[in-house]
Amino acid sequence: MHSDAKVREVFALLREGLSQAEIARRAGVSRERVRAWEREGLATTLASPMRSVGAREPHDIDQCDAMLEVPIAPYVYLLGQYLGDGCISTQGRGHPRLRISTCNDYPLISSECIAAINAVAPSANVCVIQSVGCAEVAASSMHWPCLFPQHGLGVKHKRAITLDSWQRRYALEIRPDLLVRGLIHSDGCRAMNRVLTRGKRYEYLRYFFNNESADIRWLFIDACSRLGVDARHNNRNSVSVARRASVATLEKIVGPKR
């Protein structure tokens, strides 16, 4: 779909009295399009409900202030989901599309993810694409690259993942609990640890967060430390929370995945 600037260019050429064929050649649109726009008029053409946001002037990310108006709590939770199992792709018309993978075994997590998207981008239409054992929650908005500047080509663990200053304030200073919740809902688990010591069996709850990106794992550890939660690497790509007091804190913040 042509931009508003292209529409205005065509009408400026029409005012000069040029033929439809010449206007089509100069503006790079079809003669049928020029004819239809001339018939409808400038105001009607620009106001058409069929014209999408992506057909208007390009979105200026550097001038966008969406982060100043975003509701902090749902945004921080969605940030955790995005860092764990999300990505931003570009559709055919150039619309940024947020895509987050969810597991069909946990419908309440999927619902919470959808609710967060609706709160952060209320004008975006959320769709759920079902697959075997999982579903992709997706929504398009021109503001996703503004709200998630960590987006980029390729997988996250092969590029640096750092939070902007406003993200650090929201996610680490104001609501680290929701960052931890979003990260565990996307890439973590709550498990019963069973050990045999001197012939006695012991069971205790334990939380794990697994991610190939060292930067994201350290963001999880940082957020946990601000909550008084002791989180430590237990292997190369996994962080464990095992101390009783720390597990009790996560029980209040996260609890069972459902």
Image: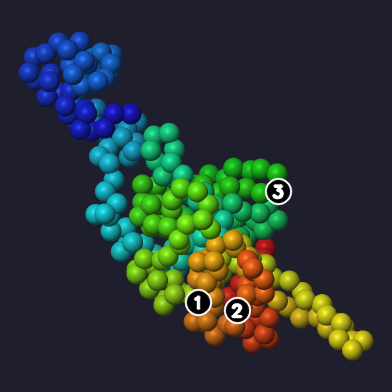
Coloring basis for residues: rainbow
Looking at the rendering, which quadrant does residue 84 occupy?
bottom right
| Residue ID for mark 3 | 133
Please give the name of the residue rendered at 21% of the width and 27% of the height, measured from the top-left corner: 7
Q: Amino acid under label 1? A: Asp
User: Amino acid under label 3?
Assistant: Gly
Which image quadrant for residue 85?
bottom right
Please tell me which residue lies in front, 80 or 11: 80
Is residue 70 shown above or below 141?
A: below
The residue wearing badge 2 is 231
Element type where label 1 sits in the image: helix
x 45%, y 61%: residue: 160
- Residue at image coords 73%, 71%: 191
Using the image, determine if residue 247 lies above or below residue 43.
Answer: below
Q: Earlier in the sequence, mark 3 or mark 1?
A: 3
CA gap between label 2 and label 3 equals 30 Å
Report whether residue 5 is seen. yes
Specify whether 54 is left or right of 63: right
Image x and y of residue 234, in percent: 67, 74
> What's the distance in space between the residues labelled 3 and 1, CA to CA?
32 Å
